[in-house]
Image (tube, rainbow, N blue to C red):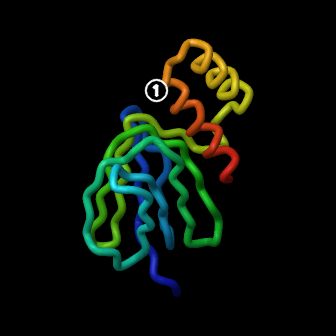
Amino acid sequence: MAAELHVELVAADRSVWSGEATLVVARTTSGDIGVMPGHQPLLGVLESGPVTIRTSDGGTVVAAVHGGFISFADDKLSLLAEIAELSDEIDVQRAERALERAKSDADASAERRADVRLRAVSAH
């Protein structure tokens, strides 16, 4: 059996995903990071971006994450996000409209959120 780590992806309002994985890739303020079983303990600040989880059964889970924290110790990875959506929960047309609206309103943070949502869908 391959080594695995236990992953908890939690948003402020709900548990988004929980399970076993072989690799998690996330964006932190220090850059993109990949976490595999046996990684050194870490604590970091999440940037808005897609999080990719390679599940133990060979599948892939992608989520759009907007801010929060990542911590890892003893093969347990916690992603504590302000907002997180699984890629299959994202309404692409709604995200595209939000992106256009943010661009026309010159709202950089809303534009970034919409862009992350669309990247999470396309990465899946």
Give percent across and percent down for residue 51.
51, 52
- Residue 117 versus residue 46 in the image, above or below: above
What amino acid is at disc 1?
Ser
Seen at 45% across and 56% down, the residue is: 26
Q: In which quarter of the image is residue 104?
A: top right
Q: Hey, which residue is sitting farthest bottom in the picture?
A: 1
State the residue position of label 1. 109
- Residue 83 versus residue 121 in the image, above or below: above
Q: Quadrant of residue 93?
A: top right
- Residue 21 versus residue 120 in the image, above or below: below
Please state if 21 lies on the left or on the right of 77 as rendered: right
Give percent across and percent down for residue 37.
40, 76
Please state if 19 lies on the left or on the right of 54 as rendered: left
Q: Residues within 10 Å of mark 1 (few under 14, many from 20)?
A: few
SS class of the residue under badge 1?
Answer: helix
Please state if 43 lies on the left or on the right of 112 as rendered: left
